Amino acid sequence: MRHASPIATTAMAVAVLATSASLVTTGAIRLKGRAAPRTQLVLLGTGTPNADPDRSGPAVAIVVDDVPYLVDAGPGVVRRAAAASARGIKGLDPKLLRTAFITHLHSDHTAGYPDLVFTPAVLERDAPLQVYGPPGIRVMTDHVMKAWAEDVDVRLRDLEPAKPAGYEVRAHEVKPGLVYKDARLSVHAFAVPHGAWKRSFAYRFDTPDRSIVVSGDSGPSGQLASACNGCDVLVHEVYSTAGFVTRPPEWQRYHRVYHTSSAELATLAAKARPGLLVLYHQLFWGTTDEALVAEVKRGYAGKVVSGRDLDVF
């Protein structure tokens, strides 16, 4: 683990974020007329296991000084990064994707993991992929590397120009606490409840100008609220309370245990006190972005947006 100078959060960044957030209820916040912040939050995928063509699988990027750090690797993660790069987020050039944090091993959060391993490597990533996640991430990584072993062998040994280091993956199994630190940020993991999963993490990122918490999949968690504790941005999963009543009883039982309703999230956010609450991994069930925000705001007076793929905050 690399060590750097202490991380500090500036009041100015919080003020800018709060002022901008008051202008919208959905969509990205753009800091018009102001210098770009050192830290950008990019929603690469806001989807769920449902095959919504407009929402890729769960993936979030925290980009600090043009250096990207990913949370999860849902389906489409690399192409969404390429799309963000084409829109001006230089740090999300696919060949620069070198560090990722996995919240848990559900398929919708990891189905893009082989893509994250191999596509940037083919595009000449010049350093190993560093992946941090719960117990089981090493076994998953081993299986991925074995499944594509012949592909890697052909690419490295035949005519294709290649950088061998880019095909390496170093998987780190982490526990709650400080899991990563470098000159740009520190990352803490903390356990969250997600049904039968023994290890499911949320992550807090502290950078020179922002503090960001990403829930991953989670039921209501007091520990998550404490980890935010006035953080600049809380990115949290949610399901529609109105839509929930339309679901079959067996699915209601599942979602009640594994996920967080809009009403429960309102209670949690009131305790967490984020500068901005960003909804992602939304289960709408016929509800709109605007209606989902309204559901949360019935019990929470703070600033809320419903995120969409490629939104930038």
Image: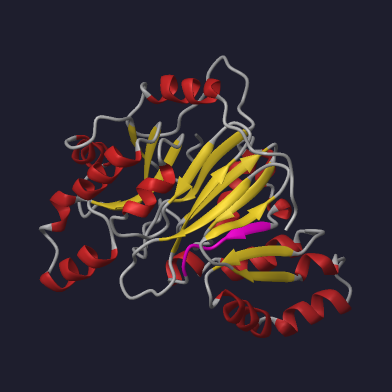
- Residue located farthest toward the top when viewing the structure as drawn: 33
- Asked whether, in this view, residue 141 is left or right of residue 19, the answer is right
Relative to the observer, which residue lies in front, 299 or 36? 299
**Quadrant into which the N terminus falls:** bottom right
Q: Is residue 280 visible?
A: no
Above or below for 303 versus 279: above
- Asked whether, in this view, residue 177 is left or right of residue 156, the answer is left
Residue 148 in the image: state x and y as whole percent. Answer: 68, 81
Relative to the observer, which residue lies in front, 281 or 266? 266
Taking the spot 46% from the left edge, 46% from the top edge, the residue there is 213
Taking the spot 62% from the left edge, 47% from the top edge, the residue there is 186
The boundaries of the magenta stretch are 99-104
Taking the spot 53% from the left edge, 40% from the top edge, the residue there is 41
> Across the whole image, how many numbered discs are drawn on residues?
0
Relative to the observer, which residue lies in front, 46 or 100? 100
Res. 118 image quadrant: bottom right
Residue 165 in the image: state x and y as whole percent. Answer: 82, 67
- Asked whether, in this view, residue 81 is left or right of residue 161, the answer is left
Q: Is residue 5 in the magenta section?
A: no
Q: How is the image coloured?
A: secondary structure
Relative to the observer, which residue lies in front, 65 or 285? 65
Taking the spot 64% from the left edge, 69% from the top edge, the residue there is 172
Residue 100 in the image: state x and y as whole percent. Answer: 61, 58
Res. 246 image quadrant: bottom left
